[in-house]
Amino acid sequence: KNWGTIFMFAIGLGIVGNIFVLVNYMCLFRSTMKSVQLLLIHLAFTNTITLVTKGITRTISIFVLINLMDTAGCKILIYLSRVARGLSISTTSLLTVVQAVTISPRTSRWRWMEPRSAWHILPLLLFFWVLNSLISMNLPFYIKHISSLNTSNISKNNNYSKCYFESGNRIIRWIFIVLMVLRDAVFQGVMGWASGYMVFLLHKHHQQVLYLQTSKLLYRTPPEMKAAQSVLLLMLCFLFFYWADCFISLYLTSSLGTDSIANGLHEFLTIGHAIVSPFLQIHRDGHFNIRAPST
């Protein structure tokens, strides 16, 4: 229960952070809202869904509130959690691409990809919702709920609540697993290209700053360059938690999930990005691209 209390505190902190970021950018809502702002709103909203679904499930698990959960509740919570996970990687990938295109030279061949306004991003976000909803559509058919469990090790009066996956058609399960892996690989590949391009442009900008400082000329770093650094930080945060989660999952699979410490760490890593990312944005808020010039 001590670990559960810490887990719930972290979730609560993450929800507050994401709502703060969400409200902050919504207050900047204008007809000239920038694409990066809209993507950050969507990312904060996605993070909130992840934390709320995990928080509800964890609360029920800690306090054994079996009357608040049934099979339908399990299906909804786990489905939303999985869709939100896909939306997180999709949105982060698009965020890096948009920021990379924004800071690219006007003569760059990638400049045509720059959105003319934030509203040009909406069809892509809608596509992400449809894509991730379809990729996760098999989950509800395999999720069940245990409202009570009686075994020789558990008292008949000790009710317990949890959701679990029921084994189904192996072929269909592998088809959806392949689709999920393919989705993650594609979006991370795009993320890698965009981030590499941003690092290259930031290096060129750094060399230019050093030259101007040597020449004793005053030079002010453009806000979009500072925004690029913040987006790179968000992307690195996402990749750290994503791959750490993958490695811990592999370890748990090989150890048959018997390591309680690894189980607790895995539980935190699945939501780590949703908790940490809003505070990275808050920390760099003064340097973020909320005043980037119109295109």
Image (cartoon, rainbow, N blue to C red):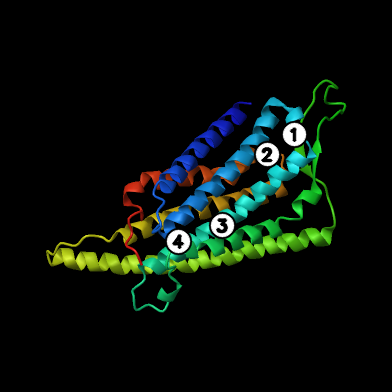
In which quadrant of the rendered view does residue 177 lie? bottom right
> Residue 3 at x, y = what percent?
60, 30
Type of amino acid at the residue the image marks with label 3: Ile
Which residue lies at the image location 16% right of the left edge and 63% below the top edge?
A: 213
Kindly report the distance in space between the C-alpha atoms of the residues bearing marks 3 and 2.
28 Å
Q: CB atoms at circles 2 and 1 under 8 Å apart?
A: no
Helix or strand or loop: what does disc 1 sit on?
Answer: loop
Say if 198 sits above or below 256 in the image: below
Residue 49, image x and y in percent?
Answer: 59, 44
What element does badge 2 sit on?
Answer: loop
Across and down, in percent, residue 198 comes to 39, 66
Mark 3 vs mark 4, CA separation in Å: 19 Å
Give the numbered dot on residue 69: 1
Q: Quadrant of the N terminus?
A: top right
Per the model, the C-alpha gap separating discs 1 and 4 is 39 Å
Residue type, mark 1 in image: Met
Tell me which residue sits at (21%, 60%) in the image.
220
Left or right relative to 26: residue 220: left
The label number, if any, that marks residue 118 in the structure image? 4
> Does residue 293 lie above or below 269 as drawn?
below
Give how far apart the Cα atoms at labels 2 and 1 are. Answer: 27 Å
Number of the front mark, 3 or 4: 4
Single out the mark in the foreground, 1 or 4: 4
Residue at the extreme left of the image, as rendered: 216
On the question of residue 256 being in view, the answer is no
Query: What crowding class fits label 2: few (fewer than 14 Cα within 10 Å), some (14-19), or many (20 or more)?
Result: few
> Dot 3 corresponds to which residue?
89
Read off the residue under disc 2: 259
Relative to 279, is 78 on the left or the right? Answer: right
Q: Nearer the viewer, residue 215 or 126?
A: 126
